[in-house]
């Protein structure tokens, strides 16, 4: 029996990268998956097609996770299509680097509208339908607990996520619903590739990337998206039924 047979799940921001692998993994474990995307319908449909080719069931739904009305419609449409909702994985997020004197109110609103408000209101919308035994997994980051130059805004948004799951746990726990977060470290995605140098201390800019990894990560490599997806799959399964309000670091052992 597959771990998630008979379950319905929404995975936000799942047209590429970590979100795609989460959607694929949950489908492999038997869940019907709603693949959410903001602006990449072709990529989202490719994920749906891959799931279907492997014998799974999935559909793509567009929703901008910075817009509360679209978040609510995403959840409503998923329930109308599949008749239930058992799992929410809130993966959508945006990156930001900027010096203190360069951060604008627009930057703050853009980052927090997706990384914080988007996840909060996704949890709110999903919780209206989740039964006892329902699961919510939000996405924090190892950036919330380590210092990186010019990364304050992003790190603050991800720290807020860990605070949210900690404080929502008793409220949702009364209904038998668990809420946790994952905190990925460096992961081999296109987003990570675009920003790899910015995560490196300025004094190490000329050091080979492999040497930097060895000095910062116990496993001396980036995570693969499938490894993050495996951690999420554990948290939404019955195996994690007594884990609530936690943020699970999936970072290879940060030094």
Image (tube, rainbow, N blue to C red):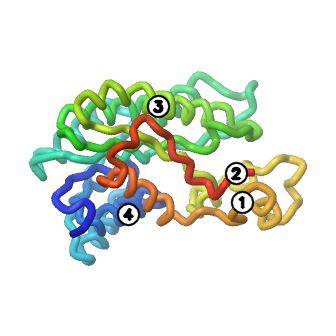
The numbered mark, 3 or 2, whose residue comes first in the sequence reads: 3
- Residue nearer the viewer, 203 or 27: 27
In 3D space, how far apart are the residues under numbered discs 4 and 1 (Cα atoms)? 34 Å
The numbered mark, 3 or 1, whose residue comes first in the sequence reads: 3
Q: Residue 254, labelled with which disc?
A: 2
The numbered mark, 2 or 1, whose residue comes first in the sequence reads: 1
The numbered mark, 2 or 4, whose residue comes first in the sequence reads: 4
In 3D space, how far apart are the residues under numbered discs 2 and 1 (Cα atoms)? 6 Å
Residue 188, position as x, y percentages in the image: 59, 63
Q: Residue 83, labelled with which disc?
A: none
Residue 164, position as x, y percentages in the image: 45, 28
**Residue tagged 3:** 116
Residues marked 4 and 1 touching at CB (< 8 Å): no
How many numbered circles are shown? 4
The numbered mark, 4 or 1, whose residue comes first in the sequence reads: 4
The N terminus appears in which quarter of the rendering? bottom left
Which residue does the image show at 56% across and 61% down from the upper left?
189
In the rendered view, tell whether residue 158 sits above or below residue 1: above
Residues marked 2 and 1 touching at CB (< 8 Å): yes
Q: Residue 7 appears in which quarter of the rendering?
A: bottom left
Q: Residue 218, labelled with which disc?
A: 1
Q: Residues within 10 Å of mark 4 (few under 14, many from 20)?
A: some
Residue 187 located left or right of residue 237: right
**Residue tagged 4:** 43
The numbered mark, 3 or 4, whose residue comes first in the sequence reads: 4
Which residue does the image show at 20% across and 39% down from the upper left?
132
Which residue does the image show at 62% across and 35% down from the upper left?
155
In 3D space, how far apart are the residues under numbered discs 3 and 4 (Cα atoms)? 25 Å
Label 2 SS = loop
Which residue does the image show at 42% across and 29% down from the upper left?
117
In 3D space, how far apart are the residues under numbered discs 2 and 4 (Cα atoms)? 32 Å
Residue 24, position as x, y percentages in the image: 35, 65
């Amino acid at each position: 029996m597959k771990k998630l047979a008979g379950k319905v799940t929404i995975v936000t921001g799942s047209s590429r990268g970590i979100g795609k692998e989460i959607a694929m993994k949950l489908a492999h474990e038997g869940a019907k998956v709603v693949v959410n995307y903001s602006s990449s319908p072709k990529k989202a449909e490719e994920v749906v097609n891959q799931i279907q080719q492997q014998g799974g069931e999935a559909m793509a739904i567009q929703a901008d996770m910075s817009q509360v009305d679209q978040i609510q419609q995403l959840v409503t449409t998923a329930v109308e299509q599949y008749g239930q909702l058992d799992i929410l994985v809130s993966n959508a997020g945006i990156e930001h680097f900027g010096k203190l004197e360069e951060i604008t109110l627009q930057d703050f609103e853009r980052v927090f509208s997706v990384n914080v408000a988007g996840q909060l209101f996704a949890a709110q919308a999903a919780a209206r339908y989740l039964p006892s035994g329902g699961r919510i997994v939000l996405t924090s980051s190892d950036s919330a607990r380590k210092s990186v130059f010019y990364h304050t805004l992003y790190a603050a948004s991800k720290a807020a996520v860990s605070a949210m799951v900690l404080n929502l746990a008793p409220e949702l726990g009364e209904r038998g619903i668990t809420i946790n977060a994952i905190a990925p470290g460096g992961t081999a995605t296109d987003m990570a590739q675009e920003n790899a140098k910015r995560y490196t201390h300025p004094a190490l800019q000329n050091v080979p990337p492999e040497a930097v990894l060895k000095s910062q990560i116990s496993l001396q490599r980036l995570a693969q998206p499938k490894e993050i997806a495996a951690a999420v799959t554990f948290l939404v399964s019955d195996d994690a039924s007594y884990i609530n309000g936690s943020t699970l670091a999936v970072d290879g052992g940060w030094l």
